[in-house]
Amino acid sequence: MRPNPSRDTAVGLFVLAGIGAIAYLSLQLGGVSLRPDPTIALYATFDEIGGLKTRAPVVISGVRVGEVESIDLAEDYRARVTLSVREGVELPVDSSASIVTSGVLGDRYISLQLGGEDAALEDGEEIEFVESAVILERLIGQFIHNTNIESKE
Amino acid sequence: MRIALLADVGVRSTTFAEEIGRITVFASRLCGAAVRRPLRMRRFVDEVFYLGVLSLVIICVCGLAVGAVLGLQGYNTLERFGATDALGTVVGLSLIRELGPVLTALLTTGRAGSATTAEIGTMVATEQLDGLRMMSIDPLHYVVMPKALAMVFVMPLLSALFIVCGITGGYLVGVYWGVDPGSYITSLETAVTFWDEVVGSLLKSLCFGILVGLIATYRGYFSAPTSQGVSSATTATVVQASVSILIFDYFITALWGV
């Protein structure tokens, strides 16, 4: 069978397009990076993380600056969350991290509020001020409990 | 009467077992042919053209359409809960985990698998394969193996293209109906993980490629050398490949958790 250059070109383009699609799925959506942006690791320990998952976004004023890298149980049985934050984002040492929900049923993510100190958090440091996730059911339970006590009095 | 029924069941089960055995032997012969020199690269590239490049249009159009329908259905359902921001997750996960590999395999069965069976079947009927044997060229090596291998090769590529088209279709419909483009992409990126979703999806389509390639070439190679034999072999390919894709899909999902 004789070689057919135009057909070979079509096959080449097809294979490239297919590999491009696979690359888009793995690199862009799957979050695998060949040359990762330099990030710093920060830690935060929460009493309650609700439904926070790894790869959840970390935002400042709603702008994504990093993601949740891992979630472990600390020695005191609190939740120790590792955040990877883009290098170059200068966070004052008295910044605080809170777990919030997008919408009522939306995904949990971590929002950072900037502090006022001059010194910035370094790689591997702990964010001291944290605000745990709000569990809606628990709030409702407390509310019902309180109204019960008040009505008895 | 009852004996006849029993005998019928017996004949059917032995035929089925025999068929499984023959297709396994055929598969091992194909594997042997795949590593034997010469490698038949020329034939392989040509088959990638016929099976892959010519299936591109149908794959892209169907991908866009399926993505658009998913976007519309997902939007209408999610709107009731005010959770339309999660549209990207719905469209992306269902495409990557299930619809991409399965629909691509079904479409490729209809578009390329049937053609493969018909072509090999016609070669059997017109004694072209015997002609090759006369020239001491192994038809399994020259005709059948490149087709089966090309099918295995193109399936993951087509499936990935289908998924990307589908995600685009869902994006267009979602954004048209007022979903924020940023939250569509963000919810997609948060939900999709490399190992669980992307690798699993590619493995799935690879399995389907092996399945379709094997069934299509087997049916063609062993079709009866008559016009009726070729037509029934083509029908058998489409039916058996489609059914086994859906059955294997369940087991792959159950065993690997993809």
Image (cartoon, rainbow, N blue to C red):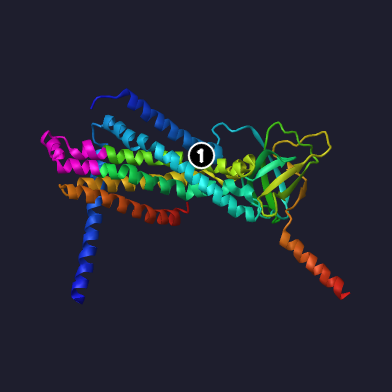
Q: SS class of the residue under badge 1?
A: helix
Q: Which residue lies furthest to the front in this view?
A: B176
Question: Could you say which quadrant of the image residue A115 lies in?
Answer: top right
Q: Which residue is drawn at 60% across and 41% down?
A: B175
In the displayed structure, does residue B194 sit left or right of residue B34? right
Position of the N terminus of chain A, as image quadrant, is: top left
Figure check: A144 above or below A84: below
Question: Foreground residue, A17 or B68?
Answer: B68
Question: Foreground residue, B57 or B133?
Answer: B57
In the displayed structure, does residue B109 sit left or right of residue A73? left
* Amino acid type indicated by mark 1: Leu
Would residue A54 be seen by someone viewing this image from the given angle? Answer: yes
Residue B165 in picture, x, y percent from top left = 49, 39
Question: Foreground residue, B52 or B57?
Answer: B57
Q: Name the residue under label 1.
A: A25
The part of the chain drawn in magenta is B118-145
In the displayed structure, does residue B221 sit left or right of residue B253? left
Would residue B25 be seen by someone viewing this image from the given angle? Answer: no
Question: Foreground residue, B8 or A72?
Answer: B8
Figure check: A32 above or below A131: above
Position of the C terminus of chain A, as image quadrant, is: bottom right
Figure check: B224 above or below B185: below
Question: Could you say which quadrant of the image residue A66 lies in?
Answer: top right
Q: Which residue lies furthest to the right in this view?
A: A153
What chain is tagged by disc 1?
A: A
* Magenta run includes residue B34: no
